[in-house]
Image (cartoon, helix red, strand yellow):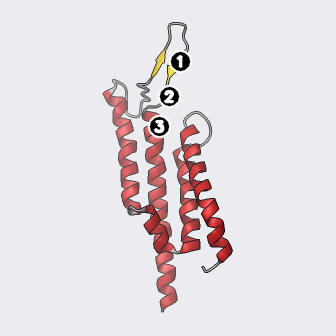
Amino acid sequence: MNSTILRTGSRVLLPLFLIASVLILLRGHNEPGGGFIGGLMAVIAVALHAIAAGPEAARAALRVEPLTIAGIGLLCAVAAGFWGIAAGGDFLTGVWPLLTTTPEGDKAGLPVGSVLLFDTGVYLTVLGAVSAILFALEDAVYAEGDD
């Protein structure tokens, strides 16, 4: 698409969508949101960039093949599962190594652990898989237009 308004607007909206997607990812294991919804927000940013600047520019902006991103995400999610086993629990048991309980019973430290790793894995898997589908559909549309 060759629209000056869309290209200009996407320069503003693209970082906003990406920031919103990361914020949704980070708050997801405590409140509604998480890796899936955050990943979909990131795909919206990729799709907007693909529409405004073309699919090749969107692929270049990702810098890594979409299926590689999905594979890394899948590895993160599986690693989060095995982290629970390594800590003495079951597969996908939550582990928070930086969170401690004070003698008064209060929580202290950072609530960062296997749940965030799992959510990050889901985020990357959704981003990579849906971006790959998006690019495949765009390639088919452009190939059909060449005939």
Left or right for 36, reference 66: right
Measuring 59% from the left and 72% from the top, which residue is drawn there?
52
| Outermost residue, right side | 5
Residue 107 is marked as 1
Residue 49 position by quadrant: bottom right
- Tag 1: amino acid: Lys
Q: Dot 3 corresponds to which residue?
A: 116
* Image quadrant occupied by the N terminus: bottom right
Residue 25 position by quadrant: top right
Q: Is residue 144 above or below residue 100?
A: below
Between disc 1 and disc 3, whose residue precedes?
1
- Tag 3: amino acid: Leu
Gap between marks 1 and 2 measured at Cα: 9 Å
Label 1: which secondary element = strand
Residue 111 is marked as 2
Camera-side residue of 8 and 130: 8
